[in-house]
């Protein structure tokens, strides 16, 4: 029987039917986290999920030494930018990261810097830029309801998985928190029904605003 799993350069099994952002989301659901001092005054937290587009195929094509170097450099740059924007990596796995921020503005600024940083790094095999996908969502965390974190992670993961390489998608809630910031432009990307997430959700694509033209 054919399988969606294939060997990656590290000799492990990779299920191409599931993206890294969903694997990370599944891994943290049900875990208990201490959010003391790590949410906004009104109890909101912003989650950023990111991975590399078509990572399994890319790593196989590169071969083990080059793939290891790519993942190491990718991880170092993600951690550097996240730290610079005051975020915290909750979970990292291969090419994927789950990051939390107190500030929605800081999270969105970090997302755009990540996108631009990797877009300027050509891959050794093709010379094309590395394409990462990013999804963000701001949700309210209730300390006594651990599953609140899980639901917010699932929504952030669904949004990230809908993004194309080089694209940043955000929830309508995050847009509400940040839309008055003149640095950003929000473009409607559709009303989505995500598996495992109640009701319809409107998502937006984000880019830097060209202040010189406005």
Image (spheres, helix red, strand yellow):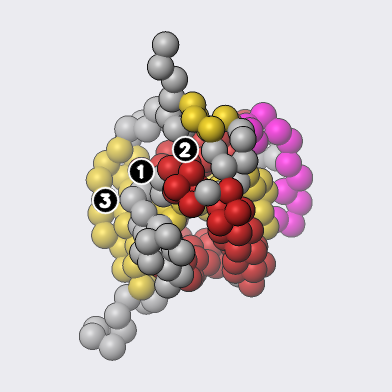
Q: CA distance from mark 1 to mark 2?
A: 11 Å
Is residue 123 visible to the viewer in this orientation of the structure?
yes
Q: Are marks 1 and 3 in contact (CB under 8 Å)?
A: yes
> From the image, which quarter does the N terminus lie in?
top left
Task: Provide residue 100's location: percent of width, then percent of height.
Answer: 61, 53
- Which mark sits nearer the N-terminus, 1 or 3? 1
Question: Which is more foreground, mark 1 or mark 3?
Answer: 1
Q: Residues within 10 Å of mark 3 (few under 14, many from 20)?
A: some
- Which mark sits nearer the N-terminus, 1 or 2? 2
- Label 3: which residue? 189
- Label 1: which residue? 162
Asked where in the image residue 127 lies, by quadrant, the reply is: bottom left
Residue 39 counted in the magenta span:
yes
Please, is residue 10 above or below residue 14 in the view?
below
Residue drawn at 64 percent across, 64 percent down: 76
Q: Residues within 10 Å of mark 1 (few under 14, many from 20)?
A: some
Give the magenta-colored segment's residue range: 27-41
- Label 2: which residue? 19
């Amino acid at each position: 029987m054919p399988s969606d799993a294939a060997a990656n350069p590290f000799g492990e099994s990779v299920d191409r039917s599931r993206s890294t952002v969903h694997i990370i989301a599944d891994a943290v659901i049900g875990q208990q986290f201490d959010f003391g001092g790590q949410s906004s005054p009104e109890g909101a937290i912003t989650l950023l999920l990111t991975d590399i587009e078509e990572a399994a195929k890319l790593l196989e094509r590169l071969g083990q030494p080059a793939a290891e170097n790519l993942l190491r450099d990718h991880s170092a740059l993600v951690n550097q930018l996240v730290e610079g924007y005051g975020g915290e990596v909750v979970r990292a796995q291969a090419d994927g990261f789950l990051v939390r921020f107190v500030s929605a503005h800081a999270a969105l600024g970090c997302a755009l810097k990540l996108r631009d940083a990797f877009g300027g790094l050509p891959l050794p095999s093709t010379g094309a830029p590395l394409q990462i996908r990013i999804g963000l969502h701001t949700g309210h965390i209730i300390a006594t309801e651990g599953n609140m974190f899980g639901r917010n992670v699932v929504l952030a993961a669904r949004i990230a998985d809908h993004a194309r390489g080089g694209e940043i998608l955000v929830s309508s809630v995050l847009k509400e928190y940040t839309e008055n910031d003149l640095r950003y432009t929000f473009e409607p990307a559709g009303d989505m029904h995500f598996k495992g997430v109640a009701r319809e959700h409107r998502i937006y694509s984000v880019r830097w605003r060209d202040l010189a033209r406005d």
